[in-house]
Image (cartoon, rainbow, N blue to C red):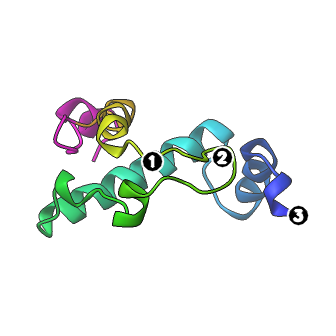
Amino acid sequence: TTFAWTLDDIAPQIDGACEGDWTAEKLLEVGERVWNLERQFNIAAGFTGKDDSLPKRLLKDAAKTGPAKGKVSELGKMLPEYYDLRGWTKDGVPSNETIKRLAL
């Protein structure tokens, strides 16, 4: 199945179909550029970090089964770390450094 494939498996196929010397690293960079460009588009459309949420049920009700049984999503604690890993500001906006690094 395609789920067993890694970027190292996919890159040669894209390289065969497209110009550009495609590697796994280049695919990751393209994906990061797309993700950040989408974020910039959403910000321009009026969305903010306050719109980064989950359904109320996941924020208030504890999971009833599985590995997370008894736990409630701690989105408020997770978002700052996520923003930092993405290279975004504390408000969820791609930082100037991220925009420059990705040539956006």
- Whole-Å distance between the Cαs marked 1 and 2? 41 Å
Residue 40 in the image, given as x and y percentages of width and height: 23, 56
* Of 74 and 27, the residue lying toward us: 74
Vertical arrangement, residue 76 with respect to residue 56, above or below: above
The residue that mark 2 highlights is 22
The residue that mark 1 highlights is 72
**Residue 65 on the magenta span:** no
Q: Residue at x 72, y 46 (%)?
A: 7
Q: Residue at x 68, y 44 (%)?
A: 67
Q: Amino acid at mark 1?
A: Val
Vertical arrangement, residue 18 with respect to residue 81, above or below: below
The residue that mark 3 highlights is 1
Q: Quadrant of residue 23?
A: top right
* Of 90 and 9, the residue lying toward us: 90
Where are the magenta residues, as a range? 89-104
Q: Residue at x 60, y 57 (%)?
A: 64
Q: Amino acid at mark 2?
A: Trp
